[in-house]
Image: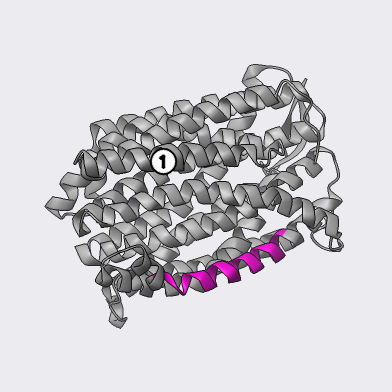
């Protein structure tokens, strides 16, 4: 018999109740997934807003933003992956009825988020040197490095916000993150209008203005979400207020989960970002075009992230209750729902790619390259969604290094070399680079699925 969360009067998902049918699994996965989808999509909409508004400020400004964004996102996602243990441990503690321990896990997550944010921020200060080291054009490297300095001071905020969001999702309360993110979209867009184009007497900073707006928005989001966790009506029950800081052993467990999955996030993100950097060798038009296609994929992937979080929480809850059948059903229901959702998005990529690209740029050269690249990316959405959810499932099962090895093989041994061959040797340019990533995500989905199938035949215990 599986288990699912029940809804209270405020429509928050609080307590687990028995689930016996397939439709129950679908219904409860959707109930938990949709606020997370909106929350994660909101974060990506902020990125899309930056790209779209900067794109209309000029091809060079878009190129600078693209190169800086590709680099800082890789660093940021490594940090986010290292914090994923916050959600895994919280979900398992919640599923086991050990509510008081959840607040201690949040405190651990915030401390780790602050520390990781400082480290990532310091690395961002050397963006120009890194871009020059990998052979980027000095003008692009200088512009990208200048923007990475502005990203640096927001890294502690975004990682502490993510840790708090993981805690809330782990106790099946995803809606506060959704609401905070929806408000931040508006704030970020208004700040962009002021700082990119210089409205109402503000300085016209172009791409740098977009990054400053994003950094301000990240700090506001973190403050709002931490304040909610502190003041929510059951903060005492969950040990947020009045709880003790957990012992060293729990922190060690959080890091044990986080290190390999931070590396896994870095492997995938660096592979995607490497292709953006490779597009930079094809010129500013190809770089901007590939970033547009990459941005559309990332926006679609937020649906998979939402289902992945929901599926991971439900798998974690089932593990906390020692419910082996519930683990299996929750996992595959989540994967199936994700594939259906990503297929629908892929239809839009196939039939209206020019309209999607037109949101970001009106430059004819950039539009032509981006439209062809988006058509190729439509083919990878279902597989990308499946592998994203399966990785979340394996994290919740406490899998440590095997998924990292599978990711490394799929993306760096297969996707990157194949992309370089198709994009450069065969002369297909940016669409060819995207074809290489298609090969990587297909292989990752197959390998991760086989790994979970093998794992689910054995007892899975709480960490």
Quadrant into which the C terminus falls: top right
Residue at the image position 25 percent from the left and 45 percent from the top: 430
Q: Residue at left 61%, top 34%?
A: 31
Quadrant in which the N terminus appears: top right
| Residue drawn 55% across the image and 36% down it | 406
Span shown in magenta? 109-127
Left/right of residue 412 with respect to residue 61 in the rendered view: right
Pinpoint residue 99: horizontal percent, then vertical percent: 83, 47
The majority secondary structure of the magenta stretch comes to helix
Asked whether 440 or 379 is in front, the reply is 440
Q: Is residue 110 magenta?
A: yes
* Residue placed under numbered mark 1 in the picture: 300
The image shows residue 386 at horizontal and vertical percentages of 50, 31
- Is 7 colored magenta in this rendering? no
Picture coordinates of residue 68 (x, y %)?
37, 64
Image quadrant where residue 82 sits: bottom right
* Residue for point 86% across, 59% down: 247
Label 1 element class: helix
């Amino acid at each position: 018999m599986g288990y699912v969360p029940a809804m209270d009067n405020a429509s928050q998902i609080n307590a687990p109740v028995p689930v016996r049918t397939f439709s129950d699994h679908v219904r409860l996965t959707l109930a938990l997934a949709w606020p997370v989808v909106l929350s994660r999509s909101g974060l990506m909409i902020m990125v899309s807003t930056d790209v779209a508004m900067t794109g209309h400020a000029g091809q060079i400004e878009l190129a600078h933003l693209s190169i800086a964004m590709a680099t800082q996102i890789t660093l940021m996602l490594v940090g986010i992956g290292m914090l994923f243990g916050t959600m895994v441990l919280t979900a398992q503690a919640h599923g086991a009825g050990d509510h008081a321990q959840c607040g201690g896990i949040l405190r651990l997550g915030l401390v780790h988020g602050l520390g990781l944010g400082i480290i990532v921020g310091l690395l961002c200060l050397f963006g120009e040197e890194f871009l020059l080291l990998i052979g980027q054009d000095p003008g692009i490297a200088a512009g990208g490095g200048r923007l990475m300095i502005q990203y640096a001071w927001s890294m502690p905020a975004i990682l502490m916000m993510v840790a708090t969001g993981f805690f809330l999702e782990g106790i099946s309360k995803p809606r506060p993150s959704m609401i905070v993110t929806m408000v931040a979209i508006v704030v970020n867009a208004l700040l962009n209008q002021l700082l990119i184009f210089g409205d109402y007497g503000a300085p016209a900073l172009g791409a740098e203005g977009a990054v400053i707006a994003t950094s301000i928005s990240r700090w506001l989001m973190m403050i709002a979400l931490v304040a909610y966790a502190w003041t929510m009506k059951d903060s005492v029950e969950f040990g947020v207020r009045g709880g003790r800081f957990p012992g060293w052993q729990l922190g060690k467990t959080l890091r044990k989960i986080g290190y390999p999955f931070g590396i896994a996030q870095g492997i995938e993100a660096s592979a995607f970002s490497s292709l953006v950097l490779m597009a930079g060798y094809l010129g500013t038009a190809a770089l901007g075009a590939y970033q547009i296609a990459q941005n559309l994929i990332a926006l679609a992937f937020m649906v998979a992230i939402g289902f992945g979080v929901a599926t991971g929480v439900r798998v974690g809850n089932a593990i906390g209750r020692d419910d082996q059948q519930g683990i299996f059903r929750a996992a595959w229901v989540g994967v199936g729902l994700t594939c259906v959702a990503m297929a629908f998005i892929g239809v839009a990529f196939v039939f209206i790619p020019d309209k999607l690209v037109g949101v970001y740029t009106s430059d004819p050269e950039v539009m032509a390259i981006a439209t062809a690249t988006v058509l190729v990316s439509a083919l990878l959405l279902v597989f990308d969604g499946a592998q994203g959810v399966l990785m979340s499932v394996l994290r919740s099962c406490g899998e440590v290094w095997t998924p990292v090895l599978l990711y490394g093989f799929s993306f760096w041994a297969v996707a990157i070399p194949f992309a370089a061959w198709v994009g450069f040797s065969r002369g297909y340019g940016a669409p060819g680079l995207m074809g290489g990533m298609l090969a990587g995500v297909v292989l990752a989905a197959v390998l991760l699925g086989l790994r979970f199938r093998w794992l689910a035949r054995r007892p899975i215990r709480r960490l």
